Image (spheres, rainbow, N blue to C red):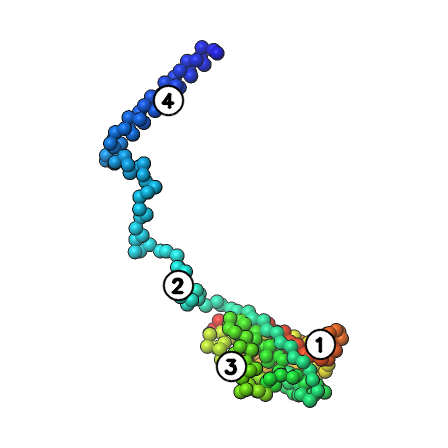
Amino acid sequence: MAASSLTTSSVLFTRSTAARKSFSSYSSSSSFPGINSVPRKFNIRATTSPAPTVSPTTTTSVGVDASPASATPSKPLPFRVGHGFDLHRLEPGYPLIIGGINVPHERGCEAHSDGDVLLHCVVDAILGALGLPDIGQIFPDSDPKWKGCDSSVFIKESVRLMHEAGYDIGNLDATLILQRPKLSPHKEAIKANLSALLGVDPSVVNIKAKTHEKVDSLGENRSIAAHTVVLLMKK
């Protein structure tokens, strides 16, 4: 080994030994010098010291036992979107009521109420936007008072709940799916009546109608369905 290497190693060894001796002398004394004579055991046993007390002004996370109301946003949403869907069987001997309009047809909707597939669908869309239970829970078909009920009652209640929550309808888009009859001659009457029930201008209501290309119960004229999307705006 070169002389320079031996000299460097000797210096490092000497410094390391001196450092260990210095640390040993500190740890053997009752306290570390200089830092206000802090007892040695404070540093050595710091992990066993009690947790610091939380100041009353410190912000903490909500506990698991918080009330359900605490999860409600303090600031209402500026808008809400809801989707509704409904389907009814078509059977002979029943009137076909769509949007509160009696549409001439040899079949109508078999249902507990008047079977208005569009109004039921619109109600569910509004309730969904508000985050409320669906129409079947609020107006259960097990309750005899809804037997044969005009579905405008359900619309008016959903509108009341909407206004109570502080919202108005921004716009509504509905699609009716049935093979027969053709709804073109009735669409304007359906739109006007639905707009009146909702208390909105007809320009914010859109009604579309589609066939089901003779596929499944819809295409075989055994059922009728509807989809609705509604936008609610904060007042």
Residue holding disc 2:
66
Whether tag 3 and tag 2 are in contact, CB under 8 A, the answer is no
Quote the CA–CA distance across marks 2 and 1.
48 Å
Secondary structure of the residue carrying tag 4 is: helix
Residue holding disc 3:
157
Secondary structure of the residue carrying tag 3 is: helix
Quote the CA–CA distance across marks 4 and 1.
90 Å
Mark positioned earlier in the residue sequence (1 or 3): 3
Dot 1 crowding, Cα within 10 Å, few <14, some 14–19, many 20+: many
Whether tag 1 and tag 3 are in contact, CB under 8 A, the answer is no
Residue 16 — which label?
A: 4
Give the residue drawn at x 48%, y 67%.
77
In the depicted structure, whether residue 1 falls above or below residue 207? above
Q: Is residue 85 visible?
A: yes
Residue holding disc 1:
218
Mark positioned earlier in the residue sequence (3 or 4): 4
Q: Is residue 232 visible?
A: no
Quote the CA–CA distance across marks 3 and 2.
32 Å
